[in-house]
Amino acid sequence: MRKIIHIDMDAFFASVEQRDFPELRGKPVAVGGSGERGVVAAASYEARTFGVRSAMSSRIAKQKCPQLIFTKPRFEVYKQVSSQIRNIFAEYTPLIEPLSLDEAYLDVTENIPGIVSATKLALEIKQKIREQTNLTASAGVSYNKFLAKLASDYRKPDGIFVIKPEEGAAFVAQLPVEKFHGVGRVTALRMHELGIRTGLDLRQQTEAFLRQHFGKAGGHYFRIAQAQDDRPVEPDRIRKSVGSENTFIADLDTLAEMQAGLLPLIDDLWRWCHRTSVYGRTVTVKIKLNDFQIMTRSRSALLPIRNRAMFEQMVFELLEENFPLAKPVRLLGVSLSNLEDSQPYEGKQLALPF
Protein backbone atom coordinates (compact mmCIF):
# COMPACT_ATOMS: atom_id res chain seq x y z
CA MET A 1 0.00 0.00 0.00
CA ARG A 2 1.36 3.39 -1.01
CA LYS A 3 2.04 6.34 1.28
CA ILE A 4 1.19 9.55 -0.59
CA ILE A 5 1.59 13.16 0.54
CA HIS A 6 -0.07 16.03 -1.28
CA ILE A 7 1.52 19.40 -0.50
CA ASP A 8 -0.45 22.53 -1.38
CA MET A 9 0.99 25.97 -0.71
CA ASP A 10 -1.43 28.33 1.03
CA ALA A 11 -2.66 31.17 -1.24
CA PHE A 12 0.74 30.88 -2.92
CA PHE A 13 0.99 33.93 -5.20
CA ALA A 14 -0.70 36.23 -2.69
CA SER A 15 1.37 34.85 0.20
CA VAL A 16 4.61 35.55 -1.69
CA GLU A 17 3.48 39.14 -2.24
CA GLN A 18 2.63 39.55 1.45
CA ARG A 19 5.96 38.02 2.43
CA ASP A 20 7.96 40.34 0.17
CA PHE A 21 5.95 43.49 0.89
CA PRO A 22 5.22 43.84 4.62
CA GLU A 23 2.68 46.61 4.02
CA LEU A 24 0.38 43.98 2.45
CA ARG A 25 0.38 41.65 5.45
CA GLY A 26 -2.96 41.17 7.12
CA LYS A 27 -4.76 42.93 4.28
CA PRO A 28 -7.02 41.60 1.50
CA VAL A 29 -4.75 41.13 -1.51
CA ALA A 30 -5.50 39.93 -5.04
CA VAL A 31 -2.83 39.06 -7.56
CA GLY A 32 -4.00 39.97 -11.05
CA GLY A 33 -5.27 42.80 -13.17
CA SER A 34 -7.29 45.54 -11.48
CA GLY A 35 -8.85 46.87 -14.69
CA GLU A 36 -12.47 46.47 -15.70
CA ARG A 37 -11.60 43.29 -17.63
CA GLY A 38 -8.98 42.00 -15.20
CA VAL A 39 -9.06 38.58 -13.56
CA VAL A 40 -7.98 37.49 -10.06
CA ALA A 41 -5.14 34.96 -10.33
CA ALA A 42 -4.90 34.44 -6.56
CA ALA A 43 -6.42 35.88 -3.40
CA SER A 44 -5.07 36.13 0.12
CA TYR A 45 -7.03 34.52 2.94
CA GLU A 46 -8.04 37.98 4.13
CA ALA A 47 -9.64 38.56 0.71
CA ARG A 48 -11.25 35.13 0.66
CA THR A 49 -13.28 35.98 3.76
CA PHE A 50 -15.13 38.48 1.53
CA GLY A 51 -15.79 35.84 -1.11
CA VAL A 52 -12.95 36.80 -3.45
CA ARG A 53 -11.65 33.77 -5.37
CA SER A 54 -9.19 33.00 -8.13
CA ALA A 55 -10.58 33.23 -11.69
CA MET A 56 -13.13 35.82 -10.48
CA SER A 57 -13.39 39.00 -12.52
CA SER A 58 -11.68 41.94 -10.87
CA ARG A 59 -14.87 43.97 -11.14
CA ILE A 60 -16.84 41.46 -9.07
CA ALA A 61 -13.94 41.05 -6.64
CA LYS A 62 -13.91 44.80 -5.95
CA GLN A 63 -17.66 44.75 -5.41
CA LYS A 64 -17.28 42.03 -2.81
CA CYS A 65 -14.29 43.70 -1.16
CA PRO A 66 -13.99 47.44 -1.88
CA GLN A 67 -10.72 47.66 0.10
CA LEU A 68 -9.12 44.91 -2.01
CA ILE A 69 -5.48 45.63 -2.95
CA PHE A 70 -4.40 44.46 -6.41
CA THR A 71 -0.80 43.55 -7.18
CA LYS A 72 0.66 42.65 -10.54
CA PRO A 73 1.83 39.02 -10.81
CA ARG A 74 5.57 38.31 -10.63
CA PHE A 75 5.70 34.86 -12.21
CA GLU A 76 9.49 34.65 -12.29
CA VAL A 77 9.56 35.10 -8.49
CA TYR A 78 6.86 32.46 -8.03
CA LYS A 79 8.83 30.03 -10.20
CA GLN A 80 11.98 30.64 -8.13
CA VAL A 81 10.15 29.95 -4.88
CA SER A 82 8.51 26.88 -6.41
CA SER A 83 11.94 25.55 -7.39
CA GLN A 84 13.15 26.13 -3.83
CA ILE A 85 10.22 24.10 -2.50
CA ARG A 86 10.82 21.37 -5.07
CA ASN A 87 14.39 21.04 -3.78
CA ILE A 88 13.00 20.42 -0.29
CA PHE A 89 10.79 17.64 -1.65
CA ALA A 90 13.83 16.07 -3.31
CA GLU A 91 15.48 15.64 0.10
CA TYR A 92 12.78 13.10 0.91
CA THR A 93 11.87 11.29 -2.30
CA PRO A 94 12.63 11.25 -6.03
CA LEU A 95 8.97 10.43 -6.72
CA ILE A 96 7.59 13.97 -7.07
CA GLU A 97 4.73 14.87 -9.41
CA PRO A 98 4.21 18.64 -9.69
CA LEU A 99 0.66 19.67 -10.54
CA SER A 100 1.45 23.37 -10.72
CA LEU A 101 3.86 25.86 -9.17
CA ASP A 102 2.15 25.53 -5.80
CA GLU A 103 1.23 21.86 -5.37
CA ALA A 104 2.68 18.39 -5.85
CA TYR A 105 2.25 14.74 -4.99
CA LEU A 106 5.05 12.88 -3.19
CA ASP A 107 5.27 9.10 -2.95
CA VAL A 108 7.08 8.44 0.34
CA THR A 109 6.37 4.72 0.59
CA GLU A 110 10.14 4.35 0.42
CA ASN A 111 11.88 7.58 1.30
CA ILE A 112 15.43 8.90 1.54
CA PRO A 113 15.53 9.48 5.33
CA GLY A 114 13.98 6.05 5.91
CA ILE A 115 11.17 7.43 8.10
CA VAL A 116 8.28 5.01 8.44
CA SER A 117 5.59 7.54 9.29
CA ALA A 118 4.30 9.55 6.30
CA THR A 119 2.66 11.95 8.75
CA LYS A 120 6.01 12.68 10.37
CA LEU A 121 7.53 13.27 6.93
CA ALA A 122 4.75 15.68 6.00
CA LEU A 123 5.27 17.65 9.21
CA GLU A 124 9.01 17.85 8.54
CA ILE A 125 8.44 19.06 4.98
CA LYS A 126 5.97 21.72 6.15
CA GLN A 127 8.47 22.91 8.75
CA LYS A 128 11.32 23.12 6.23
CA ILE A 129 9.16 25.07 3.80
CA ARG A 130 8.33 27.55 6.56
CA GLU A 131 11.99 27.88 7.64
CA GLN A 132 13.41 28.27 4.15
CA THR A 133 10.71 30.32 2.41
CA ASN A 134 8.76 31.94 5.27
CA LEU A 135 5.58 30.54 3.68
CA THR A 136 3.06 27.99 4.88
CA ALA A 137 1.80 24.84 3.21
CA SER A 138 -1.01 22.42 3.89
CA ALA A 139 -0.51 18.66 3.63
CA GLY A 140 -2.76 15.71 2.98
CA VAL A 141 -1.55 12.20 3.79
CA SER A 142 -3.22 9.03 2.58
CA TYR A 143 -2.82 5.79 0.67
CA ASN A 144 -3.75 7.18 -2.77
CA LYS A 145 -3.58 10.43 -4.71
CA PHE A 146 -7.31 11.17 -4.71
CA LEU A 147 -7.60 11.02 -0.94
CA ALA A 148 -4.30 12.82 -0.30
CA LYS A 149 -5.49 15.78 -2.38
CA LEU A 150 -8.85 15.85 -0.61
CA ALA A 151 -7.06 15.73 2.73
CA SER A 152 -4.79 18.71 1.96
CA ASP A 153 -7.89 20.89 1.50
CA TYR A 154 -9.46 19.78 4.74
CA ARG A 155 -7.59 21.95 7.25
CA LYS A 156 -6.28 24.90 5.29
CA PRO A 157 -4.33 27.03 5.86
CA ASP A 158 -1.15 25.60 7.39
CA GLY A 159 -2.90 22.33 8.22
CA ILE A 160 -2.32 18.62 7.95
CA PHE A 161 -4.94 15.90 7.67
CA VAL A 162 -4.47 12.15 7.48
CA ILE A 163 -6.89 9.63 5.94
CA LYS A 164 -5.96 6.09 6.98
CA PRO A 165 -6.86 3.04 4.86
CA GLU A 166 -9.69 2.04 7.17
CA GLU A 167 -11.11 5.59 7.02
CA GLY A 168 -11.12 6.21 3.26
CA ALA A 169 -14.56 4.87 2.35
CA ALA A 170 -16.33 6.66 5.22
CA PHE A 171 -14.54 9.93 4.46
CA VAL A 172 -15.60 9.86 0.82
CA ALA A 173 -19.19 8.87 1.69
CA GLN A 174 -19.91 12.04 3.67
CA LEU A 175 -18.45 14.51 1.16
CA PRO A 176 -20.66 16.57 -1.17
CA VAL A 177 -19.84 15.68 -4.78
CA GLU A 178 -18.75 19.30 -5.35
CA LYS A 179 -15.73 18.59 -3.14
CA PHE A 180 -14.48 15.82 -5.40
CA HIS A 181 -11.55 16.87 -7.55
CA GLY A 182 -12.56 16.33 -11.15
CA VAL A 183 -16.24 17.12 -10.50
CA GLY A 184 -16.84 20.64 -11.75
CA ARG A 185 -19.91 22.84 -11.36
CA VAL A 186 -21.68 21.55 -14.48
CA THR A 187 -21.01 17.90 -13.62
CA ALA A 188 -22.17 18.46 -10.05
CA LEU A 189 -25.45 19.93 -11.32
CA ARG A 190 -25.98 16.89 -13.56
CA MET A 191 -25.32 14.63 -10.59
CA HIS A 192 -27.84 16.56 -8.49
CA GLU A 193 -30.44 16.07 -11.22
CA LEU A 194 -29.81 12.32 -10.91
CA GLY A 195 -30.21 12.45 -7.12
CA ILE A 196 -26.46 12.16 -6.48
CA ARG A 197 -25.38 14.69 -3.86
CA THR A 198 -22.79 12.89 -1.70
CA GLY A 199 -20.09 10.31 -2.05
CA LEU A 200 -22.48 7.76 -0.59
CA ASP A 201 -25.07 8.55 -3.28
CA LEU A 202 -22.36 8.15 -5.91
CA ARG A 203 -21.23 4.82 -4.46
CA GLN A 204 -24.74 3.42 -4.75
CA GLN A 205 -24.73 3.80 -8.54
CA THR A 206 -23.48 1.11 -10.89
CA GLU A 207 -20.50 1.78 -13.12
CA ALA A 208 -22.71 1.18 -16.17
CA PHE A 209 -25.15 3.85 -14.97
CA LEU A 210 -22.37 6.39 -14.42
CA ARG A 211 -20.78 5.65 -17.79
CA GLN A 212 -24.18 6.05 -19.44
CA HIS A 213 -24.55 9.56 -18.03
CA PHE A 214 -20.93 10.75 -17.84
CA GLY A 215 -19.11 8.75 -20.49
CA LYS A 216 -15.56 7.63 -19.82
CA ALA A 217 -15.40 9.83 -16.71
CA GLY A 218 -18.15 7.66 -15.21
CA GLY A 219 -15.63 4.90 -14.60
CA HIS A 220 -13.43 7.32 -12.69
CA TYR A 221 -16.36 8.53 -10.59
CA PHE A 222 -17.29 4.93 -9.80
CA ARG A 223 -13.79 4.17 -8.50
CA ILE A 224 -13.32 7.29 -6.41
CA ALA A 225 -16.72 6.72 -4.82
CA GLN A 226 -15.19 3.52 -3.48
CA ALA A 227 -12.11 5.56 -2.33
CA GLN A 228 -10.07 3.72 -4.98
CA ASP A 229 -7.30 5.37 -7.00
CA ASP A 230 -4.50 3.25 -8.45
CA ARG A 231 -2.69 6.08 -10.25
CA PRO A 232 1.02 6.16 -9.37
CA VAL A 233 2.92 9.35 -8.62
CA GLU A 234 4.52 10.19 -11.97
CA PRO A 235 7.78 12.14 -11.56
CA ASP A 236 8.21 12.43 -15.34
CA ARG A 237 4.68 13.47 -16.13
CA ILE A 238 4.63 14.98 -19.59
CA ARG A 239 2.97 18.27 -20.40
CA LYS A 240 0.05 17.54 -22.75
CA SER A 241 -0.55 21.08 -23.97
CA VAL A 242 0.57 24.66 -23.57
CA GLY A 243 -1.55 27.76 -24.00
CA SER A 244 -1.91 31.49 -23.55
CA GLU A 245 -4.97 33.72 -23.54
CA ASN A 246 -5.96 37.31 -22.92
CA THR A 247 -9.13 39.14 -21.88
CA PHE A 248 -9.17 42.50 -23.65
CA ILE A 249 -9.91 45.84 -22.03
CA ALA A 250 -12.38 46.63 -24.82
CA ASP A 251 -14.31 44.19 -26.99
CA LEU A 252 -12.87 43.44 -30.41
CA ASP A 253 -15.15 43.85 -33.45
CA THR A 254 -13.04 43.43 -36.58
CA LEU A 255 -10.88 40.66 -37.95
CA ALA A 256 -7.86 42.98 -37.99
CA GLU A 257 -8.31 43.80 -34.30
CA MET A 258 -8.51 40.11 -33.43
CA GLN A 259 -5.44 39.23 -35.50
CA ALA A 260 -3.53 41.98 -33.69
CA GLY A 261 -4.80 40.60 -30.37
CA LEU A 262 -3.60 37.10 -31.25
CA LEU A 263 -0.04 38.11 -32.19
CA PRO A 264 1.23 38.54 -28.58
CA LEU A 265 -0.25 35.14 -27.71
CA ILE A 266 1.45 33.55 -30.70
CA ASP A 267 4.72 35.18 -29.62
CA ASP A 268 4.19 33.95 -26.05
CA LEU A 269 3.79 30.34 -27.18
CA TRP A 270 6.56 30.47 -29.75
CA ARG A 271 9.06 31.77 -27.17
CA TRP A 272 8.15 28.79 -25.00
CA CYS A 273 8.61 26.37 -27.92
CA HIS A 274 11.96 27.92 -28.81
CA ARG A 275 13.17 27.86 -25.20
CA THR A 276 12.13 24.26 -24.51
CA SER A 277 12.62 22.79 -28.03
CA VAL A 278 9.11 21.34 -27.66
CA TYR A 279 6.72 21.72 -30.58
CA GLY A 280 3.14 20.61 -31.17
CA ARG A 281 1.08 19.22 -34.04
CA THR A 282 -2.34 20.58 -33.02
CA VAL A 283 -3.25 24.27 -32.91
CA THR A 284 -6.40 25.41 -31.09
CA VAL A 285 -7.93 28.87 -31.09
CA LYS A 286 -10.38 29.85 -28.35
CA ILE A 287 -12.87 32.70 -28.81
CA LYS A 288 -15.08 34.05 -26.03
CA LEU A 289 -17.80 36.46 -27.11
CA ASN A 290 -19.01 39.33 -24.93
CA ASP A 291 -22.02 37.22 -23.90
CA PHE A 292 -19.50 34.62 -22.59
CA GLN A 293 -20.29 32.09 -25.31
CA ILE A 294 -17.10 30.13 -26.07
CA MET A 295 -16.03 28.67 -29.40
CA THR A 296 -12.93 26.62 -30.14
CA ARG A 297 -11.43 25.49 -33.44
CA SER A 298 -8.51 23.08 -33.87
CA ARG A 299 -6.34 21.83 -36.71
CA SER A 300 -3.54 19.28 -36.71
CA ALA A 301 -0.46 18.93 -38.89
CA LEU A 302 1.18 15.61 -39.77
CA LEU A 303 4.43 16.70 -38.10
CA PRO A 304 5.20 19.11 -35.21
CA ILE A 305 5.00 22.74 -36.34
CA ARG A 306 8.54 24.12 -36.19
CA ASN A 307 8.04 27.16 -38.39
CA ARG A 308 6.62 30.29 -36.76
CA ALA A 309 5.09 31.58 -40.00
CA MET A 310 3.19 28.32 -40.43
CA PHE A 311 2.01 28.49 -36.81
CA GLU A 312 0.75 32.05 -37.26
CA GLN A 313 -0.97 31.15 -40.54
CA MET A 314 -2.82 28.22 -38.92
CA VAL A 315 -3.96 30.43 -36.02
CA PHE A 316 -5.28 33.12 -38.36
CA GLU A 317 -7.04 30.58 -40.59
CA LEU A 318 -8.80 29.06 -37.58
CA LEU A 319 -9.88 32.53 -36.49
CA GLU A 320 -11.23 33.39 -39.95
CA GLU A 321 -13.28 30.18 -40.07
CA ASN A 322 -15.49 31.64 -37.33
CA PHE A 323 -16.45 34.76 -39.27
CA PRO A 324 -18.85 36.41 -39.35
CA LEU A 325 -19.22 36.45 -35.56
CA ALA A 326 -22.59 37.19 -34.01
CA LYS A 327 -21.15 39.40 -31.26
CA PRO A 328 -17.92 41.19 -30.31
CA VAL A 329 -15.04 39.26 -28.72
CA ARG A 330 -13.84 39.74 -25.14
CA LEU A 331 -11.19 36.98 -24.97
CA LEU A 332 -8.88 35.14 -27.34
CA GLY A 333 -6.65 32.17 -26.62
CA VAL A 334 -4.19 29.97 -28.48
CA SER A 335 -2.87 26.56 -27.46
CA LEU A 336 -0.60 23.82 -28.81
CA SER A 337 -1.11 20.12 -28.10
CA ASN A 338 0.22 16.76 -29.28
CA LEU A 339 3.62 17.97 -28.13
CA GLU A 340 6.84 16.23 -29.11
CA ASP A 341 9.88 15.67 -26.87
CA SER A 342 8.25 17.43 -23.91
CA GLN A 343 10.11 18.41 -20.81
CA PRO A 344 8.78 17.24 -17.39
CA TYR A 345 5.56 19.02 -16.56
CA GLU A 346 6.27 22.09 -14.45
CA GLY A 347 3.05 24.06 -14.45
CA LYS A 348 -0.53 24.18 -15.52
CA GLN A 349 -0.15 26.88 -18.14
CA LEU A 350 1.87 29.83 -19.26
CA ALA A 351 1.45 33.08 -17.43
CA LEU A 352 -1.63 34.71 -18.90
CA PRO A 353 -1.41 38.42 -19.77
CA PHE A 354 -3.23 40.75 -17.39
Image: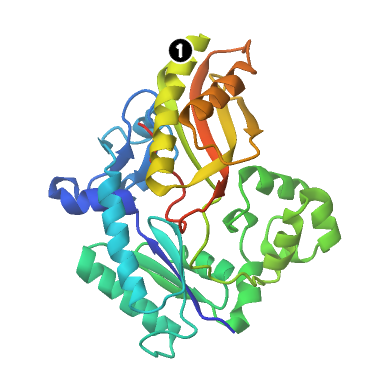
Q: Could you tell me how many numbered marks the image carries?
A: 1
Q: Is residue 49 visible?
A: no
Image x and y of residue 36, in percent: 37, 23
Residue plotted at (73% across, 45% down) = 190
The residue lying toward the viewer, choosing from 37 and 67, is: 37
Name the residue: 43% across, 17% down: 260
Classify residue 107 as left or right of residue 177. Answer: left
**Horizontal and vertical percent position of residue 139:** 41, 70
Residue 325 drawn above or below residue 308: above
Of residues 128 and 193, the one nearer the viewer is: 128
Front-lying residue, 46 or 248: 248
Identify the residue position indicated by label 1 in the image.
Answer: 257
Measured along the vertical axis of the image, is residue 219 above or below residue 147?
above
Along the line of sight, the residue nearer the viewer: 160 or 347 = 347
Image quarter where the N terminus lies is bottom right
Q: Residue at x 25, y 52 (%)?
A: 16
Asked whether the viewer can see residue 302, the reply is yes
Residue 201, horizontal then vertical, whole percent: 74, 62
Classify residue 110 as left or right of residue 41: right
Residue 223 image offset from top left, x and y in percent? 71, 67
> Which residue type carries mark 1?
Glu
The type of colouring in the image is rainbow
Quadrant in the picture for residue 263:
top left
Mark 1: secondary structure: helix
Residue at (65% x, 32% y) in the render: 299
Badge 1 crowding class, 10 Å Cα cut-off, few under 14, some 14 to 19, many 20 or more, is few
